[in-house]
Image (cartoon, grey):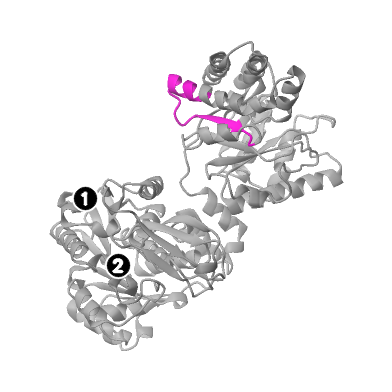
Amino acid sequence: MKNQTKFANDRALDLISIGRVAVDLYAHQVGSTLQDVASFAKYLGGSSGNIAFGTARLGLKSAMLSRVGDEQMGEFLIETLRTEGCDISQLKRDPDHLTGLVLLGLKDRDSFPLLFYRDHCADMALCEADIDEAFIATSKALLITGTHFSTPSVHAASVKALKAARANNVRTVIDIDYRPVLWGLTGKGDGETRFVADGKVSAHLQGILPYFDLIVGTEEEINIAGGSEDVITSLRTIRQLNPHATLVVKRGPMGCCVIDGDIPSHIDDAFTIKGIQVEVLNVLGAGDAFISGFLSGWIRGEDYDTCCRYANACGALVVSRHGCAPAMPTPVELQYFLQQQPAKPAEDATLNRLHRVTVPRAKRDEVLVFAFDHRNQFFDLVQKLGADEGRLPQLKQLFVQAVGEVETELGLQGKVGILADDRYGQDALNAATGRNWWIGRPVELPLSNPLEFDLGRSVGSYLQNWPKEHIIKCLVQYHPDDSVENRLDQETQIRTLYEAAQASGHELLLEIIPNKQLPQHPDTVYRALKRLYNLGIYPEWWKLEQFDTDEQWAAIDSLIQERDPYCRGVVLLGLNAPVETLKQGFKAAKVSQTVRGFAVGRTIFFEPARQWLAGEVDDRGVIEACKATFKTLIAAWRG
C-alpha cells in the first residue's frame, strides 16, 4: 500500500512535536502496587516528548515545542532531548510552573497504576504566544497529541500551530492519546483508565479532526474521537469529518491497520500488518514507540507496509523493556529485531548490547586521565611517613582541583578525566561529577588473584548508588595461560561484573595486566582480550600496558574492530613508569587506531603526595607539582 503523502522539500526539520513532556518515575519493583513500590527509575516521559525522542533516535530531525519548569527536572528533560539530537530551541523554561511528573507502577503485563502530577504544570501552560509560524514552517510535519486540546489555553495554542502548518505546506498529525484523567473524567488517582465515553470530549476532538493529514489512535481512542463504542461507526464518523486523512488504528498484539480511503465494513478488512509476538513486561509506552516508528517511515516516504512494520517492531520492543523513551530502539537494533524477531527480546544478548552501544553517547575521542584510584599505595605511604590517614580524602580533592585547572588552562573541556576510588576519594568523585569529565571508579579488591570485588560479591547492588556517568574500572591479573582453575575463577568474576554493568547501564573498563609470574609473550594480551570476547564480554574500554612493536598494536586494533566496532577505545596505563618511558610508549601507540589516551597515576602524584603528607609542601605546592607532570604527559601525548 503506497504512501501518497507529499512533503515539502528542503525543510530544516522533519517533525515538530507539541504536547506533553514530563518526568516519568517508573517503579523498579515489578508486581507491586504503587503504594508498595520502594524505588523508581527516572526517565523522560509525556507522549509528545516520547515521540520527539523516539523519532530523533530513529534518525529524523525532530523538535520539541512545549514548556518545562525552570528547575532541575526541566533541565533533565532539555538535556535528554538535546543528547538524543532533538531541536530544543522552542522548548521554553517556564519560571511560573513546575515540570509535570508521573509516577508509574508495573503491577502486571496489562496493569500500570498511574499518578499524574500535572495540576498547573509547565507544558499545560503553553499559549498562543509560544507558537512561532516561521518555526512551524521549517518542518515537514507537525504532531500534536490529544491532551493539548483539553484546556482553552493549550487548545488555542495547538489550533494556532495547526493553522500555521496548513498555511505553510506542513503535514499534520494527531496522536489522539486519550487519558480520561487529564480531561477530568476520573478521580485524580486513576491515571490507568484508558477509556471513558464522554460526548463533550468527542465533540471537542471532532472540532479539530478536519485539520489533520494523519490520525492515529487505539481502537478506544478512535471511539472517543468518533463518539461511538463501535470502531467502524467511529471510523465512518471521522471519515465524514475528514475525507482525506490517513487513519491508523493501533490494535496491540494484533498489529495495526491503515485506511487511506473508504471505511471497510469490518476492521479486519482494512490493510493490516500483523504485530510481532513478544514476551511482555508491560504495555505502557507502546503507543508512543509505535507512532515514532510509523513516522520514521512515513516522513521518509516509505510505503505503509514498511511504516507499519517499523511501528509494530518499536511497540514490541518497548513493551518488553522497562520505561518508554529510553527503551526506544536505534535504527541498528530495529533492523536486527526485524530480521531476527526474538520472542524474548529482553533475553537476547545481541539486541541488548546494540541497545546499549548504538544510542548517542558523549564523544570521547581523546581521554587524558589522572589516575589516583590507588588504595594500598596511599595506605602504605601514610604508614611509612607516620602521617594521618584521615588526610587522604583532602589530598585527592586537591588532585581534582589540579585536573580542573589543567582543563581550563589548556582548553581541554570534555577530554580530561580521573580515576578515583570511594575509600579515600569519595569527596573527590563528588567534586568531579557533573563536569563532563571521564570518571572511572575501581571495583576490584587490590592485588586479588583470582579477582575479588572490594565491597563483596553483590557488585550489582553496589552499582545502584553510582551516578550514571561513572565508569566501572576493574583491574584483572588475567593471563590466558594461567591454570584452568584460576582462569575460570577470573572469568566467572568478570562475567558477573559484565552482567551487572549491563543491568546498571554503566560503562565498563577492563584493565588487563597478565600475571607477571607467568611467561610473557608478544601475543599474551591479545589472546587475553580474544578469550574474553569469545566469552561474550564486550567492555566499552580497555586499559592496557604499552607495547613494544607496531605489530602488537595492529593485532589489537584488528581484534577490536572485528569483534566490537562499538568499543570506545583503549587507554594506556602508567605503572609508575618514569615520564621519559611513558613518552616513548605514547610515541609507539601513535600507530594504533583504538588508543584514545592515557590513565597515569603514580608518575604524577607519588612524589608530590609524599611531600604534602610529610609537610614539605602546602596545598598549592601539591597542586602545581601534579599539574606540571600532567601537562608534560598531555603535551607528549598530543605531540
Residue 146 falls in image quadrant: bottom left
Mark 1 residue crowding within 10 angstroms, few (<14) / some (14–19) / many (20+) = many
Report if residue 434 lies within the magenta region: no
- Mark number, residue 138: 1
Q: Give the range drawn in magenta.
A: 403-422
Residue at x-position 19% and y-position 65%: 155
- 454 relative to 564 in the view: left or right: right
Q: Which amino acid does label 1 sit on?
A: Thr
Can residue 17 be seen here? The reply is no
Question: Mark 1 touching mark 2, by CB under 8 A?
Answer: no
- Mark number, residue 493: none
Residue 207 falls in image quadrant: bottom left
Q: What residue type is labelled 2?
A: Asn
Nearest the camera: 557 or 351? Answer: 351
Residue at x-position 30% and y-position 83%: 197
Nearest the camera: 599 or 440? Answer: 440
Residue at x-position 30% and y-position 86%: 232
Q: Nearer the viewer, mark 1 or mark 2?
A: 1
* Residue where numbered disc 2 is placed: 3
x, y percent for residue 297:
36, 61
Q: Is mark 2 on a helix, strand or loop?
A: loop
Residue found farthest to the top: 616
